[in-house]
Image (cartoon, helix red, strand yellow):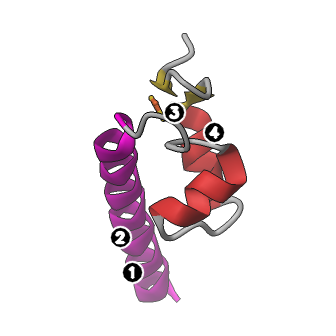
Amino acid sequence: MERIVCHCNYVNYDEIVEAIRNDGATTIEDIRSLTGVNSSCGRCGNAVEAILKRELAKIEVEIKAKTKKT
Ligand code: FES
């Protein structure tokens, strides 16, 4: 099921994660310019920030794990 995060611009959870993981977004502004999220009413800002923080933390853990293995 598609999880819509930004109802104004119809941006879903997976698109936000993709912007972070595949397109290298590290700020909400990056994600906004890539997906259009949070560019209307602004109500989704906290949700986008939470996804961003969580994904960046996961990426950091993954990098640390890879670094340990090699
Ligand atoms: S819900 Fe995202 S800008 Fe309105």
Label 1 Cα crowd, 10 Å radius (few <14 / some 14-19 / many 20+): few
Residues shaded magenta:
43-70
Q: Are marks 4 and 3 in contact (CB under 8 Å)?
A: yes
Q: In 3D space, how far apart are the residues under numbered discs 1 and 3 (Cα atoms)? A: 25 Å
Q: Quadrant of residue 60?
A: bottom left
Task: Quickly name the residue at label 4.
Answer: 15
Q: Which residue is mark 1?
A: 64
In this rendering, which labeled residue sits more in front, label 4 or label 2? 4
Marks 2 and 1: CB-CB under 8 Å? Answer: yes
Residue at numbered disc 3: 13
Q: Position of residue 65 (x, y in %)?
A: 40, 75
Q: CA distance from mark 4 to mark 3?
A: 6 Å
Provide the major secondary structure of the magenta segment.
helix
Residue 20 in view: no
Secondary structure at badge 3 equals helix
Q: Magenta includes 64?
A: yes
21 on left or right of 59: right
